[in-house]
Each structure stands twice: as C-alpha cells, then as structure tokens.
C-alpha cells in the first residue's frame, strides 16, 4: 500500500524507512498530485512554520484539508501535530490545517538542549512506547471528539480524532513501528 510522507522539511527519511520496514510503499508528497496517489499520510516532525509556508507555496493546504476531512488516515508527529491542530497558544501566525480539534503549545518542553526520552503508557498498547521529545509541543486544550492516548504529567502528548493520530514525540526515531503500522491498518480499512 502507498503511504505518503509530507516531504517539505523534517524527518522525511526516517518515516519513509519505518514505512519500508512494515512493508508499505513510501511516497514523498510534495504536490497535490503526489497526495492523490496515497492511501494515508504522515506529517513529520521538523519546523512547523517552515512546513506550513512550503505547503502553502506548493498549493497543498486545501488538498490536505480536503483529503483529511474526507477520512484519509494521517499521523502527525511533533511539528505534524502543530500543522494538524486548530490553533496554538503562540501569538505567532502560521499556516495550520485546522483538522484536529486541539490547541497546541509550541516548544512546551523547552529548547533543543532540554530534549529527553521517556517510556509512555499508550491507551490501546500492551507495552509502553518510547517517546523522543525534541522541542516538542504539548496539547493545551482538547476538543470533545478527541481521545487522549498518552500523557506526561497529566498533559496530552498523543491524541486521536477519527482517522487522525498526532504525537508530540518522534516515533520514527525509536525503531518502534506500531504507529506506522496503525496508520497502515487504518488505510486498509478506509
């Protein structure tokens, strides 16, 4: 199955490698035509402001909104979570898709030097998932239709709303492919 990775900036190679490990065909999405060719999409970690500007420049904002609103499964990690969200706590304006009913606090866990790793209890998983947090966002407000799947200190760091899964952390850096497998399974069901 063809699963896209939004390939504008960020951890593109790492997500593509995870998709290959689980037997999916990764497709680097840089245009609306690329997006039309995939059954699901991963929006990687990286720099959300840059990714949003490039998505706008390449005419991807509305096609992304349309496909996601139409039920295409999507996994957003770190910056991907910010792009999917309806808003941020920051006064800085940036392009967002507004398809995930959460408000996100950017860089909530501190600067690059304050990056950390932690085992997370994830709702629906039998074993903890290792989370790598690098200048990570945190969910500040959750809408009624959003299910919180993991938390740190009572604050959501992994959420799901329908076919949208978003994490504050980078699962692509750990070798734990359960979230990539989940998106592949969701694509097979849609």
Image (cartoon, grey):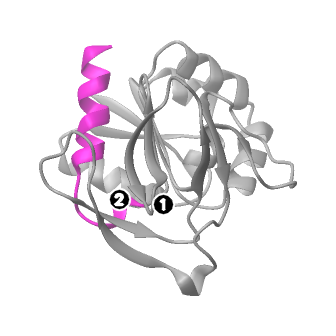
Residue at 35 percent of width and 59 percent of height: 172
Q: At 54% from the left edge and 22% from the top edge, which residue is drawn? A: 68
Residue designated by label 1:
11
Q: Residues within 10 Å of mark 1 (few under 14, many from 20)?
A: many
Residue topped by disc 2: 172
Q: Nearer the viewer, residue 115 or 20?
A: 115
| Label 2 element class | helix
In the image shown, does 182 or 59 lie closer to the viewer? 182
Image-quadrant location for residue 92: bottom right
In the current view of this chain or complex, which residue is farthest to the left? 126
The magenta stretch is 170-190
Instruction: Answer above or below: position of 134 versus 33.
Output: below
Q: Residues within 10 Å of mark 2 (few under 14, many from 20)?
A: many
Asked if the residue at tag 1 contacts the one at tag 2, i.e. Cβ–Cβ closer than 8 Å, the answer is yes
Tag 1 or tag 2, which sits nearer the N-term? 1
Question: In the figure, residue 180 lies in which quadrant?
Answer: top left
Residue at screen point 33% across, 13% down: 190
Residue most extreme to the bottom: 113
Question: Taking 175 as reference, is 85 above or below it?
Answer: above
């Amino acid at each position: 199955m063809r699963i896209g990775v939004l390939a504008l900036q960020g951890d593109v190679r790492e997500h593509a490698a995870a998709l290959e490990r689980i037997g999916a065909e990764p497709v680097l999405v840089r245009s609306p035509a690329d997006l039309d060719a995939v059954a699901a999409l991963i929006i990687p970690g990286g720099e959300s402001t840059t990714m949003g500007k490039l998505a706008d420049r390449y005419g991807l904002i509305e096609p992304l909104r349309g496909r996601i609103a139409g039920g295409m499964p999507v996994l957003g990690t770190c910056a991907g979570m910010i792009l999917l969200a309806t808003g941020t706590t920051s006064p800085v304006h940036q392009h967002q898709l507004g398809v995930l009913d959460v408000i996100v606090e950017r860089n909530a866990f501190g600067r690059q030097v304050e990056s950390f790793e932690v085992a997370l209890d994830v709702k629906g998983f039998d074993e903890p998932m290792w989370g790598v947090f690098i200048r990570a966002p945190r969910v500040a407000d959750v809408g009624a239709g959003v299910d919180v799947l993991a938390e740190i200190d009572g604050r959501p760091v992994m959420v799901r709303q329908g076919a949208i899964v978003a994490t504050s952390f980078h699962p692509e850096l750990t070798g734990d492919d359960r979230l990539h497998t989940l998106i592949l399974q969701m694509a097979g069901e849609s």
